[in-house]
């Protein structure tokens, strides 16, 4: 009896060793496991990623405030508060009552106030957590701004490009892109560890962050980034999960700088130069997104 058991064990071991030696079979077996695991994770990723720009701020209303109030301390205007409440109501129509929400918010006052007002539209049972993340803050413009040289600085930025221009004592768009990349890496881990197919991720931040997030997420070129106009205050952008492959599909139509006739402008750079600082912080965008909410930093 013992001899029979030993023989059976030996045969099983030999079969197992033979199986391991057949690399094609092992590879096929492993690939099936990996594919099914990936498919499961993808289908249980959040239903949506929603990028939201803060409401109208005191800086959007009066640009001289940047010369004596720290950028992070600038709050919403009354109009900005109404925009945030309206945005919350619009998102509530989009997000079902049985769906949950995780919020990421910039530490800047105007973003936190916007996030608070948006969340008031939802039941606390729907909101799993609200997390402040410094990586999604506004681009650093170099402490207080010099009013005398501000227009010159903005014109230089237009000539060099928003992505590459670095403000004195501040950041370039490329620096913000690196922060965005770090944040997306963390976000991917968060989505893989929190497998809730009816969850929504809302990111309340700034216009430049939103454009750079899309650039990094969809691997767009610098040239394509430079064609994107800013989002309006409390404009939002929706990325929705495709249940077939787990990828996120951009559901919001983005507005781009219109092509200019040769008699008016010969290049995109000329269009940038012609914009003033006021136009930089108060863009005029006409494309509507899902929910009929306009987009605009």
Image: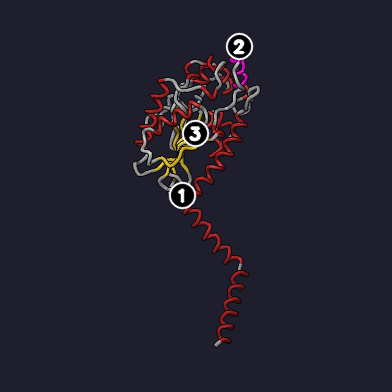
Q: Is residue 39 left or right of residue 67?
A: left
Q: In this picture, which residue range is highlighted in magenta?
A: 146-157
For marks 1 and 3 on the same chain, the one whose residue lies earlier in the sequence: 3
For marks 1 and 2 on the same chain, the one whose residue lies earlier in the sequence: 2
Residue located beneath label 1 in the image? 195
Q: Quadrant of residue 80?
A: top left
> Can you tell which mark lies on residue 268?
none
Residue 66 image position (x, y, % from top left): 55, 18
Give the position of the N terminus as an image quadrant.
Answer: bottom right
Q: Quadrant of residue 20?
A: bottom right
The residues tagged by marks 1 and 3 sit, at their Cα atoms, a distance apart of 21 Å
SS type, badge 3? strand
Residue located beneath label 2 in the image? 148
Residue located beneath label 3 in the image? 105
Against 68, residue 178 (above or below) is below
Residue 175 image position (x, y, % from top left): 62, 31
Residue located 60% across and 25% down the image? 161
């Amino acid at each position: 009896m013992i001899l029979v058991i030993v023989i059976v064990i030996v045969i099983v071991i030999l079969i197992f060793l033979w199986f391991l030696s057949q690399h094609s079979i092992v590879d096929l077996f492993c690939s099936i496991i990996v594919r099914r695991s990936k498919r499961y994770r993808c289908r249980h990723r959040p239903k949506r990623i929603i990028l939201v720009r803060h409401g109208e701020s005191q800086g959007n209303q009066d640009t001289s405030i940047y010369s004596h109030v720290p950028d992070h301390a600038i709050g919403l205007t009354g109009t900005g508060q109404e925009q945030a409440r309206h945005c919350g109501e619009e998102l509530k129509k989009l997000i079902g009552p049985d769906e949950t929400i995780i919020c990421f918010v910039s530490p800047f006052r105007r973003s936190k106030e916007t996030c608070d007002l948006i969340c008031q539209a939802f039941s606390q049972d729907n909101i799993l957590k609200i997390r402040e993340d410094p990586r999604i803050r506004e681009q650093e413009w170099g402490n207080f701004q010099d009013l005398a040289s501000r227009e010159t600085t903005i014109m230089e930025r237009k000539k060099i490009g928003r992505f590459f221009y670095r403000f004195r004592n501040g950041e370039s768009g490329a620096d913000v892109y690196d922060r965005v990349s770090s944040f997306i890496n963390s976000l991917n881990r968060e989505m893989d560890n929190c497998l809730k197919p009816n969850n929504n991720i809302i990111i309340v931040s700034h216009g430049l962050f939103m454009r750079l997030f899309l650039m990094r997420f969809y691997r767009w070129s610098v040239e394509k980034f430079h064609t994107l106009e800013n989002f309006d205050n409390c404009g939002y952008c929706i990325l929705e999960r495709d249940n077939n492959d787990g990828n996120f599909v951009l559901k919001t139509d983005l507005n781009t700088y219109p092509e200019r006739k040769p008699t008016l402008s010969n290049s995109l750079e000329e269009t940038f130069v012609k914009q003033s600082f006021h136009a930089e912080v108060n863009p005029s965008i006409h494309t509507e997104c899902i929910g009929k909410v306009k987009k605009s930093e």
